[in-house]
Image (cartoon, rainbow, N blue to C red):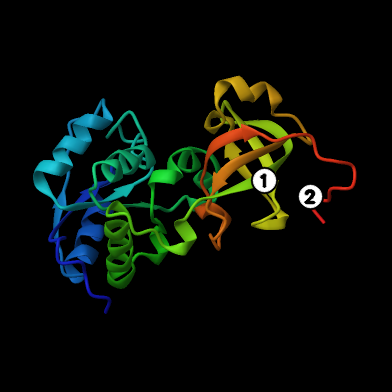
């Protein structure tokens, strides 16, 4: 079994489904931690949930979809991002990775060190994930999490669940696979430039193995490519 970071003893379980929270608590206990289930009432603000976690635990495992049963007005990715910014190791778990990774999770992915599918959750993956979160909050980024300034080429823009989204290629990551991200990540003054063929520079963790692990920030408009430039060769 992977050895846990010594600074983590109590792990908060944040989930709107009590049966899922109980299952996760057992896995956390098997991993060598003390589980602390966070209960409502409904959390209206991220700050309220963060405060509850801080006063009761050293780390957290948070489900992404917290709204269906009225647990919170926000999603788990936003909560994890807020916890990480306060240096509280926290990982995000969901059974909807394929559905939510591109937009509602990607919006916060820069501050979500570990995204774990519920199918992959076991004591070892929990310890490994929390260790990675603990290292990142102390400034140690794994190669897959380090950002690099890189070129992005827009393929098209669409709407998904009422949000404007961008489908784009990142040649330095994988020139043959398109990636979707929310247009909200692009600063408002640049969004009018989001058109097919437009090019931007952004900070991206191009060492990521999976598309769902990519994050984007610090967008800037790139100059028009020269005719002889090949972006997607």
Up/down of 3 relative to 12, above or below = below
What is the residue that sits farthest to the right in this orientation?
A: 227
Point 59% across, 20% down: residue? 189
The quarter in which the N terminus is drawn is bottom left
| Disc number placed over residue 195 in the picture, else none | none
What is the residue that sits farthest to the bottom in this orientation?
A: 1
The quarter in which the C terminus is drawn is bottom right
Residue under label 1: 151
Point 55% across, 63% down: residue? 209
- Report x, y in % for residue 68: 36, 35
* Left or right of 172 in this view: 66: left
* Left or right of 61 in this view: 55: left
Up/down of 84 relative to 28, above or below = above
For the residues labelled 2 and 1, the Cα–Cα distance comes to: 9 Å
Point 58% across, 40% down: residue? 181
Point 29% across, 45% down: residue? 84
Q: Residues within 10 Å of mark 2 (few under 14, many from 20)?
A: some
Picture quadrant of residue 55: top left
Query: In terms of secondary structure, where does tag 1 sit?
Result: strand
The one nearer the camera, 76 or 128, is 128
| Disc number placed over residue 231 in the picture, else none | 2
Up/down of 193 relative to 93, above or below = above
Q: Residues within 10 Å of mark 1 (few under 14, many from 20)?
A: many
* Left or right of 85 in this view: 10: left
């Amino acid at each position: 079994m992977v050895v846990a970071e010594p600074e983590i003893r109590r792990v908060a379980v944040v989930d709107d489904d009590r049966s899922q929270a109980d299952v996760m608590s057992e896995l956390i206990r098997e991993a060598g931690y003390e589980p602390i289930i966070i209960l409502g009432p409904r959390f209206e603000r991220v700050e309220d949930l963060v405060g509850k976690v801080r006063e009761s635990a050293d780390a957290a495992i948070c489900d992404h979809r917290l709204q269906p049963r009225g647990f919170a007005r926000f999603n788990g990715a936003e909560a994890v991002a807020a916890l990480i910014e306060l240096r509280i190791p926290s990982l995000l778990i969901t059974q909807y990775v394929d559905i939510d990774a591109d937009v509602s999770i990607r919006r916060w992915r820069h501050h979500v060190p570990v995204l774990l599918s519920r199918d992959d959750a076991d004591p070892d993956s929990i310890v490994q994930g929390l260790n990675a979160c603990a290292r990142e909050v102390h400034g140690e980024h794994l190669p897959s999490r380090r950002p690099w300034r890189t070129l992005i080429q827009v393929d098209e823009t669409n709407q998904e669940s009422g949000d404007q989204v961008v489908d784009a290629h990142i040649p330095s990551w994988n020139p043959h696979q398109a990636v979707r991200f929310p247009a909200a990540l692009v600063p408002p003054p640049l969004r009018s430039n989001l058109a097919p063929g437009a090019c931007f520079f952004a900070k991206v963790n191009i060492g990521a193995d999976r598309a769902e692990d990519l994050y984007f920030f610090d967008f800037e408009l790139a100059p028009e490519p020269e005719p002889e430039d090949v972006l997607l060769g």
